[in-house]
Image: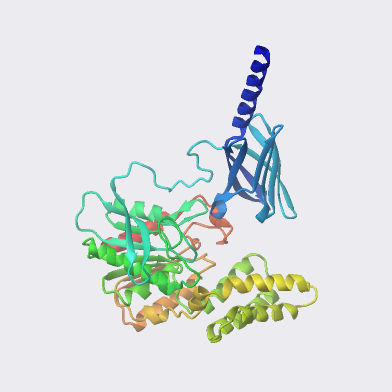
Amino acid sequence: MKYLVSSIFLLFNFMILSSQEIIGSWKGDLDVQGTKLPLIFNIKPNGNEFVATMDSPMQGAKDIPVTKTTFEKNELIVSLANMQLQFKGILKDNKIEGTFTQGQMSLPLTLTRKKEGEAVLKRPQTPQQPFNYKIEDVTFINPTDKNTLAGTLTTPANKKDFPVVVLISGSGQQNRDCALFGHKSFWVIADDFTKKGIGVLRVDDRGTGGSNGLTQNVTTQNFAGDTNAAVAFLVQKGFTNIGLIGHSEGGIIAPMVATQNTKVKFIIAMAGPGIPSDELLILQTNAIAKAAGASDDQLKSSSDTNKKLYALIKNYNGNDLKSEVKKMISEEMQILPQEQRPNATEIEKTAEQESQKVAIPWFAYFLKINPADYWSKLKIPVLAINGAKDLQVLSKENLAGIKKALEKAKNNQFEIVEFPNLNHLFQEAKTGSVEEYGQIEQTIAPQVLDKMSSWILKR
């Protein structure tokens, strides 16, 4: 009996030790057409089974739930059914060598243990302790929409009279650090500015971090209300020299707020729109497609379709925009040359997916924005900057639009700066393509940080 109990005990211990081998975070790089795409699988025990999540830092995705995780006879199988994704590999010598599959794609993938606190992507500008300034987590209410907003206020430690800025993110939901591809651009800006004597308030967008109020009906106007509430919060704390720094869509939110709120004393637009939104999007689509190798005929066809689509959305007054958009997209696909035309099932599927993306209040509102309506009313100091390799908000056209509108306002306190070789995120780039964002270690070019901070301190 004693021998039997001992055997069971030993078997039980072996099972525990075997399970412990796989518990933890495992990292590896997929080689997708020459681009390294890091993946992380985080595996935890759940009784006699395992639960896991997946991170894709380059794509800004974290804690994606894994459908099923098994580890038997040193073989790990991780499946995400809704993404048609699976990794299957063998644990040997503290490595898991196997194959990653998604749909029809199959690629080799080797995983190694990720150490506690280890960064998968090199981001040398990410701020590190110790910090020689004050850091305060804050919350406040947007009184119009009644939603709660949460953020972080950093202020110089030994100064009483200093400017303070509100950072405004671009399209899509970003947290207060504006985390994207492992970069934390707003955290980098806040750290740099505060060390130089400028206070910074950075806020979680609705639906991220500690901020709520994200619904299907919110538009740029609602986000402008959130920024207005941030300014009011700073005023209540006793600040008087308040400015706005907006990136991309945030670069149009800034003048929207400033035209209504006299407490805003200056603006910096980082890749901010300067031409009507529909024109901006046409240029953006063409630039990105051209960089990807699209032909002139393909660019023209895409532009013609998008112009029709944007005109439909901008001028629609009915109550079923999605159906009208779906119908138009379907008709446009059906008249494609036969060699480019998908089958009926694919046309239906694509039309449904695309109509869901664009037939929403935010997009309809954004398409109707003409930045000149706001820039042309401002007489406060403005710094408008952009990167010459920006493929999303093209530098030449948008900076020219901002300049023209400010001249119309007879604003004699503005400066326009185009930085050579910088992309939409103000990184030093080779092509400016979206694919480069995560590959570049630099979060934001130092000359941009220096230009913005020196401009503010001269005010």
Q: Residue furthest top?
A: 2
Q: Colour scheme of this structure image?
A: rainbow
Pinpoint residue 416: horizontal percent, then vertical percent: 39, 71
203, above or below 266, in the image: above
* Count of marks overlaid on the render: 0
Closer to us: 205 or 406: 205
Figure quadrant of the C terminus: bottom left
Residue at 38% x, 57% y: name it: 449
Regarding residue 459, the answer to whether it shows in the image is no
163, above or below 52, in the image: below
Pinpoint residue 50: horizontal percent, then vertical percent: 61, 39
Closer to us: 12 or 214: 12
Quarter of the rendering containing residue 51: top right
Regarding residue 118, the answer to whether it shows in the image is yes
Quarter of the rendering containing residue 435: bottom right
Residue at 65% x, 34% y: name it: 95
Pinpoint residue 37: horizontal percent, then vertical percent: 61, 49
Figure quadrant of the N terminus: top right
340, above or below 432, in the image: below
Q: Is residue 312 left or right of residue 214?
A: right
Q: Residue furthest left?
A: 160
Quarter of the rendering containing residue 419: bottom left
Pinpoint residue 270: horizontal percent, then vertical percent: 42, 66
359, above or below 32, in the image: below
Q: Residue furthest front?
A: 1
Q: Residue furthest right?
A: 338
Closer to us: 232 or 451: 232
